[in-house]
C-alpha cells in the first residue's frame, strides 16, 4: 500500500504541474484550456520522433522539445487565442476545444501507424528497498523533478518582476493595464510557460503510458478533477488537488480496479463541487456594483 501511495504522489505531482498551467491561463484569461493535454502529447511525440526516427541523443531532444513547445505556445496565443473585438469567454473556450481536435489530428497523422510506441528510457528500471518498502527509482525521480519545478514556478510568481505582473493581471486586469502592464505580451508569456510545462509533463508521462496521439486524454480528466478540487483560481491548490487525485486513484486501483479508480476520483470531484463550489483553496469572484 505504501508503494502505491508513493506512486500516487508522483502521479499527483504530474497532474498538479499540468493543472498549474491550466490555472495560470485561467487566472490570466478566465479560459479553461482543454488543449493542454494535446500540448503535452505533442511534446512527448517530438522527443520520440527526434530520438527514434532521427537519432538525436535524448539529452538534446528533451530540452529542444521543451523549448519548441514554449515557442509554439506563444504562436498559438498570437494566432489562435488572442481575443478579438466581440469575442467572449465562450468563444475563446470553444477555440481551445478546436485546438485540441486540431493537435490530436496532427499528432495522429505525424505518428502514423503502429501506435503506441515505446518511449526512450529516461530513468533506470530499478527500485530502492527501504525495509519492507520497494520504491521505483523512476517514481522518486518524477516526484523530485515535479517538486523542483513546482517550487521554481511558485518562486517565479512570488519574487520576480514578470511573476508579479502576471499576478497583477490575474487579480485586476483593467487596473494593471492602466498602470502600464503590457497585457498582450504577458498573456503570451503565460502561454509559453503553459506549453513548456505541458511538454515536461508529457515527457515524464510517456515512459509509463507509451506514445500515442491520445496518450494524455485520460490524464487530462484527472488533471481537471484536481484543478477543480484544489480551486480553479489557486496556483498552490492545483498541486494539492493533483496529489489528492493521485492518492485516491492509486488507493482505489490497489483495492479494486481501474473502474473503481475512475469512480472514486469523480465521486470526490462531485462532492467537492457540492460542499465547496470554488474548491478547497479557490476564491469566490467578487463584483462591485
Image (cartoon, helix red, strand yellow):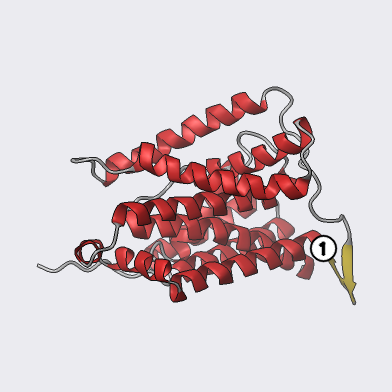
Quick one: quadrant of the C terminus? bottom left
Q: Residue 80 location, x and y as percent?
A: 37, 37
Q: Is residue 210 left or right of residue 173?
A: right
**Between 78 and 243, the one nearer to me in the picture:** 78
Q: Is residue 283 left or right of residue 258?
A: left
SS assignment at label 1: helix
- Local packing at callout 1 (Cα closer than 10 Å; few below 14, some 14-19, many 20+) is some
**Between 126 and 275, the one nearer to me in the picture:** 126
**Between 124 and 78, the one nearer to me in the picture:** 78
Q: Residue 278 location, x and y as percent?
A: 36, 65
Residue 194 visible in the shown view: yes
Residue at the (30%, 63%) spot, across then down: 169
Residue tagged by mark 1? Answer: 137
Quick one: quadrant of the N terminus? bottom right
Q: Exactly how many numbered labels are in the figure?
A: 1
Residue at the left extreme of this rendering: 289
Q: Give the quarter of the image for residue 137.
A: bottom right
Q: Is residue 171 left or right of residue 287?
A: right
Residue 266 visible in the shown view: no
Residue at the (20%, 62%) spot, across then down: 174
Q: Residue 49 location, x and y as percent?
A: 71, 34
Q: Residue 193 location, x and y as percent?
A: 49, 55
Residue at the (75%, 34%) spot, across then down: 117
Residue at the (55%, 51%) spot, across then down: 196
Amino acid at each position: 500500500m505504501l508503494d502505491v501511495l508513493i506512486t500516487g504522489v508522483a502521479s499527483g505531482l504530474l497532474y498538479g504541474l499540468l493543472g498549474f498551467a491550466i490555472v495560470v491561463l485561467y487566472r490570466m484569461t478566465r479560459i479553461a484550456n482543454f488543449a493542454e493535454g494535446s500540448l503535452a502529447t505533442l511534446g512527448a511525440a517530438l522527443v520520440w520522433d527526434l530520438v527514434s526516427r532521427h537519432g538525436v541523443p535524448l539529452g538534446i531532444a528533451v530540452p529542444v522539445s521543451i523549448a519548441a513547445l514554449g515557442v509554439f505556445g506563444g504562436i498559438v496565443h498570437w494566432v489562435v487565442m488572442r481575443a478579438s473585438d466581440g469575442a467572449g469567454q465562450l468563444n475563446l473556450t470553444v477555440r481551445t476545444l478546436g485546438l485540441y481536435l486540431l493537435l490530436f489530428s496532427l499528432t495522429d497523422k505525424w505518428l502514423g501507424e503502429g501506435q503506441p510506441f515505446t518511449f526512450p528510457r529516461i530513468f533506470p528500471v530499478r527500485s530502492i528497498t527501504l525495509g519492507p518498502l520497494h520504491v521505483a527509482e523512476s517514481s522518486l525521480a518524477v516526484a523530485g523533478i515535479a517538486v523542483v519545478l513546482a517550487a521554481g514556478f511558485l518562486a517565479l510568481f512570488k519574487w520576480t518582476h514578470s511573476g508579479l505582473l502576471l499576478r497583477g493581471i490575474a487579480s485586476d486586469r483593467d487596473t494593471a493595464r492602466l498602470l502600464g502592464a503590457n497585457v498582450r505580451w504577458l498573456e503570451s508569456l503565460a502561454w509559453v510557460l503553459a506549453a513548456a510545462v505541458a511538454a515536461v509533463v508529457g515527457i515524464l508521462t510517456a515512459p509509463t503510458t507509451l506514445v500515442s496521439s491520445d496518450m494524455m486524454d485520460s490524464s487530462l480528466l484527472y488533471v481537471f478533477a484536481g484543478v477543480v478540487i484544489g480551486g480553479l483560481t489557486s496556483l498552490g491548490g492545483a498541486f494539492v488537488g493533483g496529489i489528492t487525485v493521485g492518492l485516491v486513484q492509486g488507493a482505489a486501483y490497489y483495492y479494486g480496479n481501474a473502474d473503481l479508480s475512475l469512480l472514486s476520483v469523480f465521486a470526490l470531484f462531485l462532492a467537492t463541487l457540492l460542499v465547496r463550489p470554488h474548491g478547497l483553496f479557490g476564491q469566490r469572484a467578487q463584483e462591485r456594483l
